[in-house]
Amino acid sequence: MLSEVLEIRCKAALNRVHGMHFEWSLNPYTGCAHRCTFCYVRGFERRADRPSDHRYGQVVRAKTNIAEALRAELSRPSWKRDAVVVGPATDPYQPAEGRYRLTRACLEALAARRNPFSVLTRGTMIVRDLDVLVEAAGRAEVDVTFSLPTLDPEIWRRTEPGTPPPRQRLRALSRLVAAGVNAGVGLAPLLPGLSDRPEQIAAVVRAARHAGATHLWGSLLNLRPGTREHFLACLARDWPEQLPRYERLFAGRSFLPASAARALGDQLARVRRRYPLREETRIEPPREAEQLALRV
């Protein structure tokens, strides 16, 4: 499904983030053509009175002046070259990037200022910008994470309908690592009863290791209002036998308890010991939606 792209202008490029492991985010687009059923940003869309159901992703907003705004913000005397995470609220390498090249322009601006940054994506278009990433990595700390929660083709097809296949993401990861760019895998999010079995997680970790991943982390599903309704409707359509379990697990809550995060962390650590990477595995703890403060 092709998305309609609306050109907009932003007042600021960098967003201050609270309650996360990073302080600054950068999102060249609003809305995402990848249309992942579990995407937590659907919750933000609902709060902004925009569609969070099956219509999410039909409209993508391209912030056409974001690189200009970013360059101005990076040149301020008050800016301390803090690390910036690119794409935590919408994929920076969704199809619109092929035309607008906003993400590339932002990476060029960050590289020119020797500013550290991380990129989060499910998109393989990032290999187009390998030259910029290599240049930036020679000037500051740079890393890329490919979100890759499963290798199962059926789960991928039904839950991430607009994304490149998992194996293509791994090939893109290999190209980045071969060029000297730190690139790893985020098993995000793992879905109870669908993609969280030990053998499924081990398969992803083995594939990440084979691709040369330099880091690995995992996170759990969260079902805030906006995401919850759409995800459960898709679950009822595709895996109706799982619906009662999810209604029980997420009754009165958006996040699974901290004990679930610890259990996942332990499981990833065990697999990590069997298939070691060059960096340590980590688990992203559950956090309240309101703490994200990502301006999308």
Image (cartoon, grey):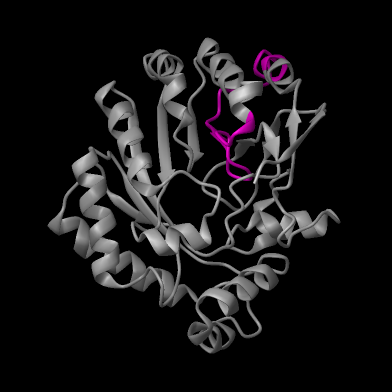
Count the marks: how many? Answer: 0
Residue farthest toward the right in the current orientation of the protein: 49
The answer to whether residue 278 is seen in the rendering is no
Range covered by the magenta-colored residues: 71-96
Expressed as whole percent of the image width and height from the top left, the position of residue 222 reads 57, 67
Q: Residue at x 73, y 62 (%)?
A: 53
Coordinates of residue 178 in the picture (x, y in percent): 25, 25
Of residues 188 and 80, which is closer to you in this image? 188
Left or right of 87, for residue 157: left
Say if the magenta span includes residue 82. Answer: yes
For residue 264, what is the image quadrant? bottom left
From the image, give the main secondary structure of the stretch colored magenta.
Answer: loop
Q: Position of residue 109 (x, y in %)?
A: 59, 15
Residue 241 image offset from top left, x and y in percent: 49, 86
Q: Where 114 falls versus 118 (above or below)? A: above
Residue furthest to the top in view is: 112
- Does the magenta-highlighted stretch encompass residue 99? no
Above or below residue 130? Residue 198 is below
Q: Is residue 124 left or right of residue 12?
A: left
Residue 154 in view here: yes
Q: In this picture, is 40 found above or below 240?
A: above
User: Looking at the image, which residue is at 30% across and 52% down?
Assistant: 281
Which residue is outermost to the front?
1
Q: Which quadrant of the figure has residue 270? A: bottom left
Comparing 209 with 143, the one in front is: 209
Q: Residue at x 82, y 26 (%)?
A: 9
Residue under the point 64% across and 22% down: 99
